[in-house]
Image (tube, rainbow, N blue to C red):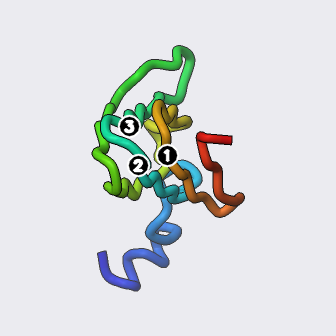
Amino acid sequence: MNQEQQSKSGGAEQGTGSGDYFVVKAKEQGVTVIGLTRGKDTRFHHTEKLDKGEVLIAQFTDHTSAVKVRGKAVVYTKHGIIDTDE
């Protein structure tokens, strides 16, 4: 999409919910990151397994309203840094 199309459509973030990005860095093997859906019923819609040291960069969208992180990890957001050890 070129710049003219973006300005006509409201920008690149249109249709992606809030468009906020977050980063999950695994501190151990087997950290699970689970995407949860928006809407009437909250459901799991995507799961990723991370090995120690792996990083996942993801974005909230029209389909993803929440994320669950299972295991020791550091989560980076525009709101701050969350360490699951604490």
Kindly report the distance in space between the C-alpha atoms of the residues bearing marks 2 and 3: 6 Å
Marks 1/2: CA–CA distance: 4 Å
The x, y position of residue 65, in whole percent, is 54, 37
Report x, y in % for residue 84: 59, 41
Q: Are marks 1 and 2 in contact (CB under 8 Å)?
A: yes
Circle 1: residue type: Ala
Q: Quadrant location of the C terminus?
A: top right
Residue assigned mark 3: 31
**Quick check: 58 above or below 35?**
below
Front in this rendered view, residue 46 or 10: 46
In the rendered picture of this protein, how many numbered marks are placed on residues?
Answer: 3
Foreground residue among 70 and 47: 70
Residue receiving disc 1 = 73
Residue 26 - label: 2
The reply to whether callout 2 and callout 3 are in contact (CB within 8 Å) is yes
Using the rendered view, name the quadrant where residue 54 is placed. Answer: bottom left
| Separation of residues labelled 1 and 3 (CA atoms) | 7 Å
Looking at the image, do the residues carrying marks 1 and 3 touch, with CB atoms under 8 Å apart?
yes
Residue 1 relative to residue 84: left or right: left
Label 3 sits on a secondary structure element that is strand
The answer to whether 2 is drawn above or below residue 81 in the figure is: below
Q: Residue at x 56, y 17 (%)?
A: 40
Three-letter residue code for mark 3: Val
Write the residue at 41% across / 37% down: 33
Give the mark nearer the N terminus: 2 vs 3: 2
Q: Name the foreground residue: 10 vs 86.
A: 86
Q: Residue at x 54, y 24 (%)?
A: 39
Look at label 2 and name its amino acid: Ala
Residue pushed farthest bottom? 3
- 65 relative to 55 in the view: left or right: right
